[in-house]
Image (tube, rainbow, N blue to C red):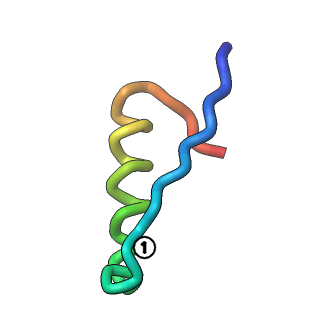
């Protein structure tokens, strides 16, 4: 199994949206049979 690291940058004006962004990308990965550690 290959392991990947994802880094994304968020503009300071959007910092309050970070938890929703994390959940969105986590959902995309898990829906594609991926695992988030």
Residue tagged 1:
19
Residue 18, position as x, y percentages in the image:
41, 73
Residue 4, position as x, y percentages in the image:
62, 30
Q: Quadrant of residue 5?
A: top right
Q: Is residue 4 left or right of residue 26?
A: right
Name the residue located 54 percent from the left edge and 50 percent from the top edge: 7
Say if 3 sits above or below 14 in the image: above
Say if 2 sits above or below 14 in the image: above
Residue sitting nearer the eye, 34 or 10: 10
Residue 8, position as x, y percentages in the image:
47, 54
Q: Secondary structure at mark 1?
A: helix
Quarter the C terminus occupies: top right
Residue sitting nearer the eye, 13 or 31: 13
Name the residue located 42 percent from the left edge and 73 percent from the top edge: 19
Residue 30, position as x, y percentages in the image:
43, 37
Say if 29 sits above or below 27 in the image: above
Residue sitting nearer the eye, 34 or 14: 14
Name the residue located 32 percent from the left edge and 80 percent from the top edge: 14
Quarter the N terminus occupies: top right
- How would you rate the neighbour count of disc 1 (Cα within 10 Å): few for under 14, some for 14-19, many for 20 or more? few
How many marks the image carries: the answer is 1
Name the residue located 43 percent from the left edge and 49 percent from the top edge: 26
């Amino acid at each position: 199994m290959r392991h990947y690291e994802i880094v994304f940058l968020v503009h300071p004006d959007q910092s309050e949206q970070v938890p929703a962004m994390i959940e969105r990308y986590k959902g995309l990965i898990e829906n594609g049979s991926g695992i988030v550690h």
